[in-house]
Image (spheres, helix red, strand yellow):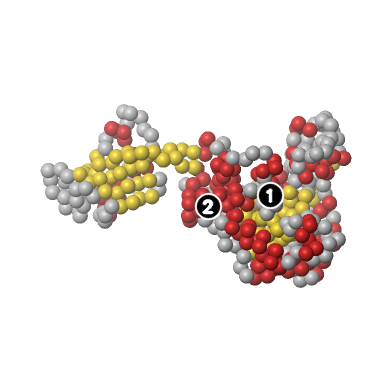
Amino acid sequence: MAAAEDRFTLYDLRVEVVATGRPMICGHRAGDWFELSGETLRFGQTFPLYPLAALLPILPAKQRQTAPADWMTTDAEVACPDPNCGARFRITRTGTREFRHGEVTVPQNVDRVELAPGYSISRLLKGGWQLAGGHGNIGRDEAVADMFAFAEAGLDTFDCADIYTGVEELIGAFLSEWRRVHPSRADAIHVHTKYVPDLELLPTLTRADVARTIDRSLARLGVERLDLVQFHWWDFAVPGWIEAAGYLADLKTAGKIRLVGTTNFDAAQLAALLDAGATVVSNQVQYSLLDQRPAGALSTLCAARGVKLLCYGSLAGGFFAPRWRGAPAPEEPLENRSLTAATSTPRSPRCGCGSTPRIAPGSTRCSPARRARPARCTRWSGCRAAATRES
């Protein structure tokens, strides 16, 4: 649904009791009132049940734009349903209010994955690296509106990192606005961030350093606990990464982190971390038709040890888009890291029919134990692409 199609307008209404020449016998008095805004009723005082029951079916129609000659437009007063009561109820349109479709209905059904017992995420995540300041100017309002559109469509899981400039703050602004607009669904949004200590700090990293960075992420996002912290270590030749993972585990015990994962750990590094006693629920890695490094030892390890793969770059940084057909290979500097695997391939994977296989971006975001099968061409029903994907 396009952004413009996702919005509609309703009238705010005020219903007031007005007197006639006959006595009122139903417990209401002249001047009594209630207001309707969206789906919310606000009463100025007590209001009798049976007159309210008679009014309720009419109010949704009065909230909507009607033709000038429609009696819903021209008639403003409704008689009390008790034939012996002289009261009338005057319905006045007091203003208009704009709503999003997702605010008043159940989100679309989307695939979900249980990352850990009791913790379910949308299978397709909303990434955040492109919102960092180094990738161009991003308007705050535009970014927050975009996040609303995803969340209200059921894609309620967001990915970011402490080193993505300004992104945790943007998501924090979205969370604040979401809680205001959807108080009953305040806990529906999941945010995965990353702990990425600076390369030069690795040799001297302390428990206090780790805690300080986690506290900063909590403040930026405006939350009391981080849903998932994905741990990254720039250089595994520098010792201390197992100790740093232990500091994160301590912060999890302290209630500041719900779950701990890793990012860009290979099979040997992840195995060492697990063997040291770390509890890791996920490992975020690049995985696409062009870059299938996770499909070997890493997938086998994750399946055996109960670690989910969260995969980024599943469309190779846009390399599967039609604009790359027949074009020269991308050159340095690359638009994004996910194009790295594409630099050795002059064109995107194609079938003998010349079309590009259709790839579901969420298809690799699943348990590594699931079997890979060839991706089908979208043009010929009998054609089969040579490339494979997780499904």
Q: Secondary structure at mark 2?
A: helix
The total number of labels drawn is 2
Q: What type is the residue that disc 1 sits on? A: Tyr
Q: Is residue 9 left or right of residue 232?
A: left
Labels 1 and 2: the sequence-earlier one: 1
Residue 127 in sight from this viewpoint:
no
Quick one: 14 or 179, which is closer to the camera? 179
Residue 105 in the image: x percent, y percent?
Answer: 49, 47
Q: Pinpoint residue 275: horizontal percent, then vertical percent.
A: 80, 69
Distance from disc 1 to disc 2, alpha carbons, whole Å, reads: 19 Å
Residue at image coords 76%, 68%: 243
Residue 109 placed where, x, y %?
58, 49
Q: Is residue 376 above or below residue 201?
A: above
Looking at this view, is 357 or 222 the one in front? 222
Report which quarter residue 217 is drawn in: bottom right
User: What kind of element bears circle 1?
Assistant: loop
Query: Residue under circle 2?
Result: 176
Q: Which residue is mark 1?
A: 164
Q: Nearer the viewer, mark 1 or mark 2?
A: 1
Task: Tell me the amino acid under the disc marked 2.
Answer: Ser
Where is the N terminus found, in terms of image quarters? Answer: top right
User: Which residue is pictured at 83% across the width and 40% down the height?
Assistant: 342
Q: Is residue 140 above or below residue 308?
A: above
- Residue at x-position 49% and y-position 42%: 100
**Left or right of 17 on screen, residue 332:** right
Pointer 2 local density, CA inside 10 Å: few below 14, some 14–19, many at least 20: some
Q: Residue at x 64, y 48 (%)?
A: 166
Q: Are marks 1 and 2 in contact (CB under 8 Å)?
A: no
